[in-house]
């Protein structure tokens, strides 16, 4: 399968695709336009904001603390964060989207977007929307602020600091949780997907599509605060690229994201037993927020109808709009896809999944 064929079929603007098999980088492809306003081409080292692919990196930092005995999965969050009101919420509940806190009820002002502790403080007094541990629902943005505050309370450092010191720096990866000023001019500019043609006969909406179209749904409440749309240019705004939200702020290249999963599988970041425990499915089935079937280990997506259904041993994380980071210890493969034209597809119909399925067919 050729990348240009995928571009033509899916009307991509610019994208990159990388695959490691074992320690070998067997595919490192890129092409198209990084900025549709200027025509700037997508180059080998073009990074992009990868949305929720970030969550797997944040989970890895958290598991490093667990591995070193600085944090326990069964530790109540209140034990390390005394202001946190929900006494029954544990660290594991945060990692598995079971905490019942997918929404920040108070509107976060734009002035706080770079102040993670202030945003976390708004969550600290909230009551869970369901009994923690009894159900799971995707904590689209709150995942990062909750885990980030726990990490800060335990170490005195931010998730971004630890990503740089423990992962990106030692491995030499072009990966930043919060882009430095010198990187921002190279970042690909995100664009909305082109409008879909009107169907001749509209198919019934799925539960997820209904939730997406309802401004008051739990899905949209979870995605809409802090509101990226309140910044000029949305996620392209330099303040957001710098902010490094631990749920969606990772700026990276496809090659670096694939390299991150290669290193995880090789035991270069976490011990193999730690990774094995982290990617063991802990929750699965109906997701109260996304309204589709999801499956999670400790911060990592695992095989389900919405993530690598063709690869039972795969783990990783998608990112809104079509981003993908995936590792598979049984097959020894790591895959990443980054792009800048955001898709509205929910399931495995995006270019990332088409390319990933082709890799598995070729293995």
Image (tube, helix red, strand yellow):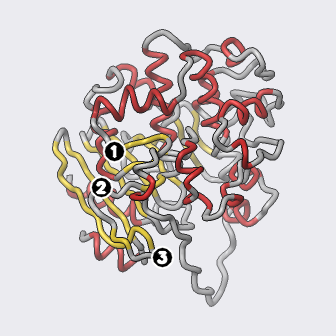
What residue does disc 3 label? Answer: 37
Tell me the quarter of the image containing the N terminus.
bottom left
- On the rendered structure, is 360 left or right of 222? left
Residue 174 — which label? 1
Indicate the secondary structure of the residue bearing disc 3. loop
Q: Which residue is drawn at 48% across and 37% down?
A: 300
Indicate the position of residue 138 as horizontal and vertical percent values.
64, 43
Q: Where is residue 271 in the image (x, y as percent from the top left)?
A: 33, 20
The extreme top residue here reads: 69
Quadrant hosting residue 13: bottom left
Q: Kindly tell me whether residue 166 is visible in this rendering.
A: yes
List x then y, in percent, for residue 188: 43, 62
Label annotation for residue 45: 2
User: For this view, does 317 lie left or right of residue 112?
Assistant: left
Q: Which of marks 3 and 1 is in front?
A: 3
The residue carrying pointer 3 sits among few (fewer than 14), some (14 to 19) or many (20 or more) residues within 10 Å by Cα, namely: few
Q: Position of residue 98 (x, y in %)?
A: 67, 32
Q: In this view, does 24 lie to the left or right of 18?
A: left
């Amino acid at each position: 399968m050729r990348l240009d064929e995928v571009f033509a079929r899916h009307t991509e603007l610019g994208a990159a695709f990388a695959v490691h098999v074992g320690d070998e980088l067997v595919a490192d492809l890129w092409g198209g336009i990084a900025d549709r306003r200027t025509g700037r081409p997508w180059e080998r080292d073009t990074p992009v904001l990868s949305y929720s692919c970030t969550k797997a990196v944040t989970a890895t930092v958290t598991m490093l603390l667990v591995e070193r005995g600085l944090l326990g999965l069964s530790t109540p969050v209140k034990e390390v964060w005394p202001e946190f009101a929900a006494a029954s919420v544990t660290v594991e509940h945060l990692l598995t989207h079971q905490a019942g806190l997918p929404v920040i009820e108070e509107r976060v002002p734009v002035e706080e977007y770079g102040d993670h502790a202030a945003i976390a403080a708004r969550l600290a007094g909230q009551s869970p929307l369901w009994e923690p541990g009894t159900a799971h629902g995707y904590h689209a943005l709150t995942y990062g602020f909750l885990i980030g505050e726990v990490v800060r309370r335990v170490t005195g450092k931010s998730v971004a600091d630890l990503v740089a010191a423990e992962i990106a720096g030692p491995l030499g990866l072009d990966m930043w949780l919060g882009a430095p000023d010198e990187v921002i001019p190279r970042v690909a500019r995100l664009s909305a997907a082109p409008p879909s043609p009107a169907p001749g006969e509209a198919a019934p909406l799925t539960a997820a599509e209904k939730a997406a179209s309802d401004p008051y749904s739990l899905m949209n409440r979870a995605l809409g605060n802090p509101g990226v749309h309140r910044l000029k240019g949305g996620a392209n705004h330099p303040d957001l690229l710098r902010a490094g939200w631990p749920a969606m702020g990772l700026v990276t290249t496809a090659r670096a994201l694939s390299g991150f999963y290669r290193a995880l599988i090789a035991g270069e970041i976490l011990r193999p037993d730690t990774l094995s425990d982290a990617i063991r499915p802990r929750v699965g089935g109906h997701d109260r927020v996304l309204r589709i079937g999801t499956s999670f280990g400790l911060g990592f997506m695992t095989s389900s109808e919405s993530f690598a259904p063709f690869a039972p041993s795969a783990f990783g994380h998608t990112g809104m709009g079509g981003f993908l980071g995936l590792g598979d210890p049984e097959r020894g493969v790591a895959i990443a896809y980054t792009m800048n034209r955001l898709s509205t597809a929910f399931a495995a119909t995006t270019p990332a999944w088409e390319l990933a399925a082709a890799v598995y067919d070729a293995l």
